[in-house]
Amino acid sequence: MLSRHKNFIFCLIGFFLICQWYNFNQYRKNDNNFEWPLEINKNNLKNIYFVKTHKTASSALQNVLIRLADKRKMRVVTNLQKEIIINSSFGLNDKIYFIHGRHNTQIAEKAFPRNNSLYMTILRKPADQLLSSLNYFRMLKGKRTTIYNNIEDERTMKKLASKNKILCLLRNSASYDLGIVNCAESYKGSEQSLINRFKKEFDFVILTEYFNEGLILLKKMLNLSYKDIVCLSVNQGTKKVDEKDREWAESVIEKVSNADVILYNYYLKKYEEVRVLLKDEVDELKRQNDYYQNECTNGREQKYFYGDVPYIGYSLRTNLTGDFKDFCVKLTSTELELTNDLLKKQLDIFSGSGNGHLREKKIRESSCSCTGSLGKPQGSSEWRKPSFKPSSLKKINLIFSLKIFE
């Protein structure tokens, strides 16, 4: 009897392993499913263009990208219009863009050529994103009844949004940031045409709900270490979502954010498939996140963003020293603090040599600095003509395929 029981267990294990092997091969063979990153040399890839969407944990991802830019001496671009001039004149690379601003394909591709730039963004479950926006933006305080009564009416919401631009981030919020729809609009095209267009414009997408899996994929593509992708939730919201509000959001979301729903569901299927393959690596990342949270901080505390917006951040330990302290500070700083520090550092480096002048087309080997207002990458930033000798900035070495989600 015991022998039969053991044989039965072995058969079950064997059946499970065969199923896992079959599923893995199906993922690789099916063009519409996840394609495992291949070890392809991507030496021509020199730049990163990240479209930062609202209320999607994009700030947490931005923290990782800022640290990457600092480590690899990448030039931070804050104004795409000015970068077009720089790119057309000098063809400079080793640059990164991660500032809030609506995506415009024509502008972006002139500043960040598609043949040598990684285009990426982040999406969140649309109903949760809608509720997060309602809870976060103070300009919407006292307007909930109006929003609840009118959000399904596109014409009314457009009219309201013409007086309060924050309302553009309620209907198809991500698709608005991504330049797919205009303010408060519904998407009018077909589902497949939207997916095809999006896949042509973006190489890589992270989902908020599969954030760690996305970081593991990013680690593979950019040849990073676990320490490079360690990420703490620095600016967690302070308000809990009411269950009735959640039910309301779920009931209206397919009508008010149809483009967001299409894109999210498409990539959700990909991540549901790939998470099994990445489980061990995700577990290791979680262990490292826990380690740095325990060693760097005393736990959570309420702070204020932009002076009056409350959020839950971290209380930094007071006994930290040296490089470890510097790393802990970066892990627990807001994106505004990190970006300002990095821009200041780059200004000091790029404008500090004094007597150098740019001549002929040798500028292609150099770099420069663009400074501007955060959150307004198309705005009135002032470009300072570089006055330093050519520098040999480290190029990003990508050894995995970009086309993960074909």
Image (cartoon, helix red, strand yellow):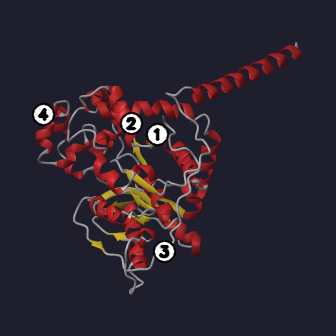
Residue at 36% across, 70% down? 369
Dividing the picture into quarters, in which one does residue 63 lie? bottom left
Look at discs 2 and 3 and give the one toward the viewer: 3
Residue identifier under label 4? 155
Q: Is residue 6 visible?
A: yes
Mark 3 → mark 4, Cα distance in angstroms: 53 Å
Mark 4 → mark 1, Cα distance in angstroms: 32 Å
Name the foreground residue: 389 vs 96: 389
User: Which image quarter holds the N terminus?
Assistant: top right
Residue identifier under label 2? 125
Residue at 63% across, 29% down? 24
Residue type beneath disc 4? Arg
Asked if labels 1 and 4 touch by Cβ distance under 8 angstroms, the answer is no
Q: Earlier in the sequence, mark 4 or mark 1?
A: 4
Residue type beneath disc 2? Lys
- Give me the disc on residue 209: 1
Residue at 15% across, 48% down? 164
Q: Earlier in the sequence, mark 1 or mark 3?
A: 1
Residue type beneath disc 3? Ser
Q: Earlier in the sequence, mark 4 or mark 2?
A: 2
Q: Secondary structure at mark 2?
A: loop
Instruction: From the top left corner, tell me how far across and down residue 157 is, in percent.
Output: 15, 37
Dividing the picture into quarters, in which one does residue 262 lie? top left
Q: Is residue 142 left or right of residue 67?
A: left
The image shows residue 20, relative to residue 126, as above or below, that is: above
Asked if labels 2 and 1 touch by Cβ distance under 8 angstroms, the answer is yes
Residue extending farthest to the bottom is: 355
- Give me the disc on residue 391: 3
Residue at 38% across, 32% down? 196
